[in-house]
Structure formats: structure tokens, C-alpha cells
Amino acid sequence: MSNKKPDLKSIQTLLDSDLKKSHSLPPVHQWKPEFSGDLDMQITRDGRWIHEGGEIKRAAMVKLFSTILWREGDRYFLVTPVEKVGIQVEDAPFFFTSLEVRQGEKGQELVFTSSTDDVVIASAEHPLRVETDPDTGEPSPYLMVRYGMEGRLSRNVFYQLAELAGERNGTFGVESCGEWFRIG
């Protein structure tokens, strides 16, 4: 482990140069840098990114950092080829703010877009799930994004989803890409 304190600016500079070469996600699953320490960064329940107590307002910077998120067990990291820094996540690291319904090869497709412009289609690879708070009965809907990380659906998106729902074999749910997902 290096003695150098993790630096947000150095991570951004490295990423900017790497991502200009490619329009796809960086291969974080192939990078195995040493742990460099924790960064004072948090992703809130509503998808805001906070660094040293202040919200990161530059959408491009947040989007850039979201491309290098990595999860190991219950911990989250920003990973580059040379650095791995721990960050805090209140609930889920992604936050879905819109839903589009379209027709695909297997019928209806539910297409979700996150606040960081990740587009994910609910499917067997990207399942939807809903957790219900046992005390309040409040639902918390999630969608698998990548590398074992999920995104929470905004309240408005969940209401849209509920409007699309139907009943099948006694369960309330929605269909996407030929898969049935229970939502209530």
C-alpha cells in the first residue's frame, strides 16, 4: 500500500486521458491495483455524489467516476489501472431517473436510464427486484447494473413501473425481455 493520500484530481486526469481513446466502459474488472486508502466521497440514496462534504455538480465528472465503480463484498471503490480508493455508498451506487417501454425480439423491453446516463434493459442478466421495509411497508426497487452493483429506481420511475404491472400466477409484476419480475 502506498503512503500517498488518494487524490481525486489525479484519478480524474488519468481517466480523462484513457476515456478519450474509447467510448466504452473502462475494463475495471481487469484492473488489480493495490488499495490506496479511502477517499472522502459518498454516493447518497438519491444518486448525488458528495466529495469532502460538497456535492459534485459537474455531471461529466460524476459520469466519469461512475464508469470506474467497483464492488467487493459490501465495499465500493473507484478503480484505475494504478489506484483503488474506497468510497461510501448509502444504498445503491446508481439511481434510475427514467423508464422507456419499447418492443424488442422477446416482446416488451423496459429500458431504464440512470442519472449517470447508464442505460439498462431489465432482463435475466439485469433483473429487477423490490425490497419492502417490514416496518413501513415502503417498497425500494432495484435493478442490476454491472459487476454486482445495483441502481435504485426513483419514486417516479417506480410509479411508472407500477402502472405497467399486471398479475400472473397470483403475483403482481412486469415483463421485460421475456422475464417476469415481481414488484409487489
Image (tube, rainbow, N blue to C red):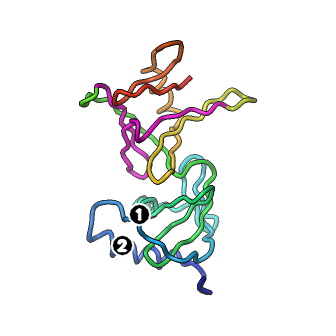
Amino acid residing under circle 1: Leu
- Examine the image and state in which quarter residue 39 appears: bottom right
Q: Estimate how packed mark 2 is, as few (under 14), some (14 to 19) or many (20 or more) residues with alpha carbons within 10 Å.
A: few
Q: Is residue 164 above or below residue 117?
A: above
- Residue 58, x across and y down, in percent: 44, 62
What residue appears at the point 75 percent right and 29 percent down from the top-left corner? 135
- Examine the image and state in which quarter residue 102 appears: top left
What residue appears at the point 59 percent right and 35 percent down from the top-left corner? 140
Q: Which residues are magenta?
A: 107-132
- Residue 50, x across and y down, in percent: 58, 61
Which residue in the protein does label 2 denote? 16
Check if residue 130 falls in the magenta segment. Answer: yes
Amino acid residing under circle 2: Asp
- Residue 37, x across and y down, in percent: 62, 75
How far is mark 1 from mark 2, CA to CA?
Answer: 8 Å
Which residue in the protein does label 1 denote? 64
